[in-house]
Amino acid sequence: MAQQRSSLSLTPAVRDLLEAWLTHLRGVRGRAEATLSAYGADVREFLAFQSEHLGGAPGPAGLRALQTRDLRAWMAAQRARDVGARSLARRLSAVKAFYKWWAERDAFDATAVLSMRAPKHIRRLPRPLSEGGAKDMIAGLADQDDRDWVQARDMAVVTLLYGCGLRISEALGLDARHAALPGVLRITGKGGKEREVPVLPAAQEACARYARLCPHDLAPGTPLFRAIRGGGLGPRAVAKVMEKTRLQLGLPSTATPHAMRHSFATHLLDAGGDLRAIQELLGHASLSTTQAYTAVDTARLMEVYNAAHPKA
C-alpha cells in the first residue's frame, strides 16, 4: 500500500525517469532484483515525501531544483519516524545514486543532493564463531531432521558458507551441475562481480553425499539445493535450522548463516592470511569492507591482553 501511495505521488515523466534508472541498473550494472526493489522503494518514498513537502508532485524540473533544505526536511522526517542512522544512510545512498545517474544523463548540477552527508552510525563488527563453534554447528545440523538427505543438504550448505566463504544467496544459487564440486568454483556475487573460490575436500564430500541422497532429480539448469517438495531451498529454511542447532549447542544468537562467512574470513586472518587475498575470496568490492575483520581480530587480542597481562 505504501508503494502504491508513493507511485501515485509521481508524475508520469518522473515515473518514466525512475524506471529508466532501474532498467539501467538491471541491464548495465547487473544489479540483483532484490537490490533493485529496495532502491526503487527508497527513491519512490523520497519522491513521495517531496510531493507533500512541496505541495504537489514535482516534475523533473522541480526535482532538479531541490535544495539542501529539502533534503534536510526529508531526513528529519525519516528520523521522526524512528528510522535508524544505518537505514537512513542506505536510503540516502539510493537517492544519490539516482541523482548521479540522472545528472550525468541530462547534464545538470545535482550538487545539493550529492553533497548531502549521511548521519554517522556505529559500524557493527562481524561476530564470527570460534573454530570449534563453527565445526560444532555443522556437525549439529545432523541432529535436526530424521531424513538423511535433509541432514546432508543442511550440512552441505553450511559447509560451503564456512569452507568457501560464500554468501547464503550464492550457495543457494548454485546450479545442479555443480553437484560434483570442482576444485575451484566461479561465483557471481553482488553487482555481477565474478570471483574464483577454492573448494575444500570437505565441501566437495559434503555436496557429493547430499547429491547421492537427494530424492529429487538434480538436472543441470535446476537448483542444486532443494526444499522438501523439490523447489529451490530458501535462505529462511537454512536460518531456521541453524537457529535450532545453536540453541541446542548453546551458541550465541549471532550464529547465523552470514556468521559462517565471517568465520571463514576471520579464521583465515588468524592463520596469517593476506587481507587482499581474503578480499578476493569474499568478493568485496572495497578493501575497507574486508578490513572490518582486522578490527574483530584486534578486539579478540585485546580481550586476551586484558585478561592475561599481569598489569591489566
Image (cartoon, rainbow, N blue to C red):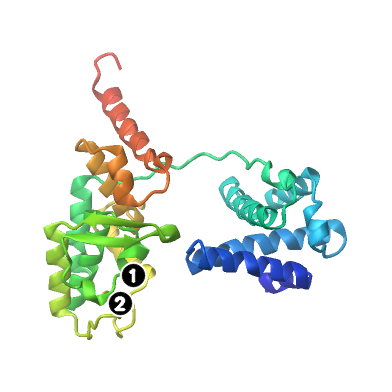
Residue 112 screen position, x and y as percent? 74, 44
The residue that appears at 61% across and 53% down in the rendered structure is 97
Residue 48 versus residue 296: which sits nearer the camera? Answer: 48
The residue that appears at 64% across and 68% down in the rendered structure is 20
Residue 158 versus residue 145: which sits nearer the camera? Answer: 158
The answer to whether residue 158 is left or right of residue 61 is: left
Query: How many other residues sit within 10 Å of disc 1, few (<14), some (14-19) or many (≥20)?
Result: some
Where's the N terminus, which quadrant?
A: bottom right
Q: Residue furthest top?
A: 311
Residue 223 — which label? 2
Q: Secondary structure at mark 1?
A: loop
Q: Residue furthest right?
A: 55
Task: Give the amino acid type for the residue marked by disc 1 in the picture.
Answer: Gly
The residue that appears at 60% across and 50% down in the rendered structure is 93
Residue 196 screen position, x and y as percent? 27, 56
Q: Secondary structure at mark 2?
A: loop
Residue 47 screen position, x and y as percent? 73, 61
Residue 2: in sight, yes or no?
Answer: yes
Task: Please report whichever mark, 2 or 1, sits nearer to the chain's N-terminal start.
Answer: 1
Residue 173 sits above or below residue 54 on the image: below
The answer to whether residue 250 is left or right of residue 78 is: left
Residue 258 screen position, x and y as percent? 35, 55
Task: Report which residue position mark 1 lands on.
Answer: 173
Residue 223 versus residue 155: which sits nearer the camera? Answer: 223
Task: Give the amino acid type for the residue marked by disc 2 in the picture.
Answer: Pro
The answer to whether residue 282 is left or right of residue 218 is: right
* Residue contact at pointers 2 and 1, CB within 8 angstroms: yes
